[in-house]
Amino acid sequence: MDALAWDPLGLPGPLRHSASFCRHRLLQALRFLLPLVGISCYRRCGFATAVSASVATGIAVFATAGVCESSSLAGFCDYRKGRNRLSIRRWVDRTDYRRRTISSGRDIRPTVRAQAAPGGPSSPSQEALFAAPDTVQTGGVQANAGAPLATRMRPTTLDEFVGQEHLVGCGRALRRAIEEDQLSSMILWGPPGSGKTTLAEVISRTTHAHMVALSGVSAGVADLRRAADGALARRSQGQRTILFIDEIHRFNKAQQDTVLPNVESGLLTLIGATTENPSFEVNSALLSRSRVYRLESLSDEDIEALVQRALRDESRGLAMFHVKLDPDALDYIVGVAGGDARIGLNALELATLATSPTGDGERHVIRATVEDAMQRRALMYDRAGDQHYDLVSALIKSIRGSDPDAAVYWLARMLEAGEDPLFVARRLVILASEDVGLADPMALPVAIAAQQAAHFVGMPEALFPLTEAALYLATAPKSNSVKTAYEGAVAEVQRSGALPVPLHLRNAVTGLMRGMGYGKGYKYAHDFEGHVVDQQHLPDAIAGSRFYEPTGEGHEGQIVERVRRVRGPGGSPSREDHEGA
């Protein structure tokens, strides 16, 4: 057996390699020493002395190997001893965690791990290091004094909740379900700052359920399974568990499938929050087991009510600063919030802290201070979400409706929010053909020129050709005859299938084809007066069908007259009708 392969101690990694190396070298030395010692002693002192000397040499070499390996063996013993201590500590932690979780009905994992850590329970870094995502207490997050104003001012009851009257107003179905503790799983879909997280916390507090809060950005399948294990322990104590998943659209299919069995069994009541359309972002199986509630942006009156409440609140708000807010400053905060309560409240707090108190301790907040604190308003826009499609839809429909003012407004909304100018240019090119078409044949060249110019100069100068194209298209005459003509042709293709091409329209490139009648009787239009010929160009089964019907708008008014002259009876162009005209 090779000395390097022999490892009776089962030494780990580096220890095994160092010990084997020493052993290998000593055994090689023994292989040469024993014959030399034996031969030398035999010649001088006889056979018995030679045997004794050889045995003594072997013992010495093996003893040396043992000495060389002793340090490795000692290190291995220390290694195993440390692993055993670590294993025992982890076993004690798990046992204590399970016992205390079952007895208290609350997940105490962060406390157990912090006590087992070298820093002890007094080390704040250990608490932060091992903090689990589901450490939200019953009834919502307990905001500390250092939290932003928007977090501190979160409502704790339905009566404090501002906005969303269509959902939680008096007599509404959702409010009755919350007050009667008859909730089912739900998806809260709404823009940022509309109250999705706050409503979930209010539901948890009102129903006395334990809420496990996870984030779709950072949580994984292991977190979902821990939440289910904790819910099972709490259910044995008679307490229900609400699983709140913020940004649930960030979960992939596997993560959403992990939630599904526990939601279906009733072990977890799911409250998902998302800013994206759940029809596209949430699995259909999970969506079918949940109610979708649409939250709207808060109105200006709602934002103003929240600001006034924060100014009056002494325990959580800004009453301690004795703030005097100018009316125009209040209007600016309401306007800059854009329906987002978080933006409005944080703007108020930032402006308050940026204002120095007067001699009597009062802080006079004016509009200039708010503007300086906020700098520039960030427009709510997601280039891959609902806002992206909603705004481009508004732009297209405004141009189609011949409203240049609305068109340039929606264009500015998109470009100022960071939309790709080439995306806007592509939409304008499509609209030039779909909605203007032959009513103004210059619409398409203008849109193409705008696309090329935007690609060539880039932003911000690209706004000029794009605005020019949008205004041109909005003020141009409109016709959708291009679209209707193609749709009519497609409908006929789907109805009648692949009809054969008439023989006289087929291309005769070989003698065989000419012999079969390909191209026979074809009339070359340019050989006739007016370049119009009376000839059937459609298959026999649909001869005389008409797909293009000009509207008469703009330039298409001239096309109507020409089409009327060249169309003969049954839909085919008529040379005689053309000559008569």
Image: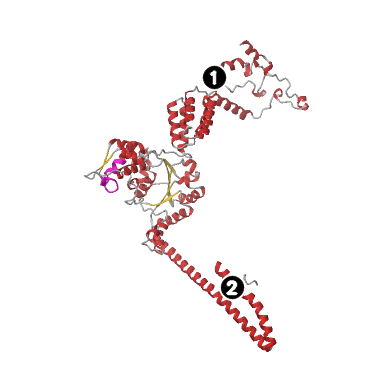
Q: Indicate the secondary structure of the residue bearing disc 2.
A: helix
Magenta region: 306-321
Pair 1/2: label in front: 2
Image quarter (top left, top right, bottom left or bottom right) of the C terminus: top right
Residue 12 visible in the snapshot: no
Q: Which residue is mark 1?
A: 556
- Nearest the eye: 511 or 411: 411
- Nearest the eye: 554 or 483: 554
Q: Indicate the secondary structure of the residue bearing disc 1.
A: helix
Horizontal and vertical percent position of residue 358: 24, 43
Horizontal and vertical percent position of residue 274: 44, 43
Residue 557 shown left or right of residue 50 in the figure: left
Q: Disc 2 marks which amino acid?
A: Cys
Q: Which residue is mark 2?
A: 22
Q: Disc 1 marks which amino acid?
A: Glu
- Nearest the eye: 474 or 362: 362
Based on the displayed image, in which of its 4 quarters is residue 507 positioned?
top right
